[in-house]
Image (cartoon, grey):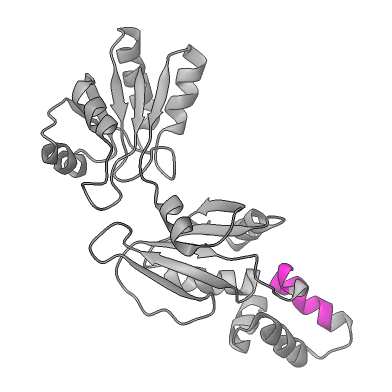
């Protein structure tokens, strides 16, 4: 059996009894970073063979995991924090296990985007996107046609740029910005996408409330929104002002988006 085990996203005590028992009883544990996982395992007195299993060696290590299955041994797969397969390795292995007919299961536990959604108080349905793609065209395609609350992971380095993009793409919607979940300095901030956020540390989950009322034109891309006014006879300068007003964002963001 292969156990996909959720591990703490911050506070080391946020782990289930079943997860600890499973990690104590398997023959081996596969993890993203052995140095990182040793801290958790030492905290619970768990000493097992530990092997790396990350996105750069996933294909090779999948075969190694399967060799344990062939011998009838149990193994566990964990990520650095949270649930395997959620922005972490595991999907490739599950595909191989399904193909081979080997048994596997999930040991429940914390997941950052679920915690953030609950803290936001917004209503389902929601869509979890993870990290935004680098290319704008890929981002636009990802967001087209989806409704309900939108949940994103943001690195501190991309925080301002990602929120600015989303303000342009979705309109200046109400959102909940959650930082350092389950850790000592956990914080929950309710704001709007176009707000200026000055923060240079931490890991963030952004929960955007798309249920709030926004001008329907804001559902268009910025380019389409601008074209709507241009076709109505507006000058480019006036059209930019109108789009900025609809989206409640500075004019320079619209200029920058359409250059």
Residue 137 coordinates in the image, percent (x, y): 64, 60
Write down the region rendered in magenta: 218-229
Q: Nearer the viewer, residue 133 or 194?
A: 194
Q: Is residue 222 magenta?
A: yes
Point 46% across, 74% down: residue:
190
**Please, which residue is most extreme toward the top here?**
71
In this picture, is 259 found above or below 109? below
Quadrant containing the C terminus is bottom right
Q: Between residues 133 and 204, which one lies in front from this camera angle?
A: 204
Image check: 84 left or right of 231? left
* Total tally of numbered discs in the picture: 0
Viewport quadrant of the N terminus: top left
One can see residue 115 in this view: yes
In the image, residue 110 lies in the stretch drawn in magenta: no
Quadrant housing residue 87: top left
Q: Is 243 on the left or on the right of 64, as rendered?
A: right
Residue at left 31%, top 62%? 180
At 33% from the left and 58% from the top, the residue drawn is 181
Q: Could you tell whether 242 is left or right of 4 in the image?
A: right
Q: Position of residue 192 (x, y in %)?
A: 53, 77
Q: Main secondary structure of the magenta part?
A: helix
Position above or below: 103 against 244: above
Q: Is residue 89 above or below residue 151?
A: above
x, y percent for residue 197: 42, 79
Q: Is residue 158 visible?
A: no
Query: Residue drawn at (74%, 76%), measured in percent from left and top?
Result: 215
Residue 212 image point, x, y percent: 65, 70
Left or right: 18 in relation to 170: left
């Amino acid at each position: 059996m292969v156990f996909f085990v959720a591990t703490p996203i911050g506070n080391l005590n946020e782990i289930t009894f079943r997860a600890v028992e499973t990690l104590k009883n398997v023959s081996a544990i596969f993890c993203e970073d052995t140095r990182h996982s040793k801290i958790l395992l030492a905290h619970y007195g768990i000493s097992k063979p530990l092997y790396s299993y990350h996105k750069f060696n996933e294909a090779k290590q999948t075969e190694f995991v399967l060799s344990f299955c062939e011998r009838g041994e149990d193994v566990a797969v964990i990520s650095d924090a949270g649930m395997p397969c959620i922005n972490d390795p595991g999907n490739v292995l599950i595909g191989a296990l399904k193909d081979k007919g080997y048994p596997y299961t999930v040991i429940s536990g914390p997941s950052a985007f679920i915690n953030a959604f609950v803290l936001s108080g917004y209503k389902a349905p929601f869509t979890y996107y993870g990290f935004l793609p680098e290319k704008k065209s890929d981002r636009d395609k990802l967001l087209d046609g989806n409704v309900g609350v939108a949940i994103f992971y943001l690195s501190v380095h991309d925080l301002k740029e990602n929120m600015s993009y989303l303000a342009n793409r979705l309109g200046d919607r109400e959102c909940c910005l959650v930082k350092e979940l389950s850790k000592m300095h956990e914080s929950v901030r309710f704001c709007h996408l176009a707000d200026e956020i000055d923060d240079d540390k931490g890991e963030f989950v952004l929960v955007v409330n798309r249920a709030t009322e926004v001008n329907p034109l804001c559902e268009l891309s910025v380019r389409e929104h601008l074209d709507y006014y241009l076709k109505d006879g507006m000058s480019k300068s006036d059209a930019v002002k109108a789009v900025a007003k609809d989206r409640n964002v500075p004019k320079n963001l619209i200029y920058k988006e359409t250059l």
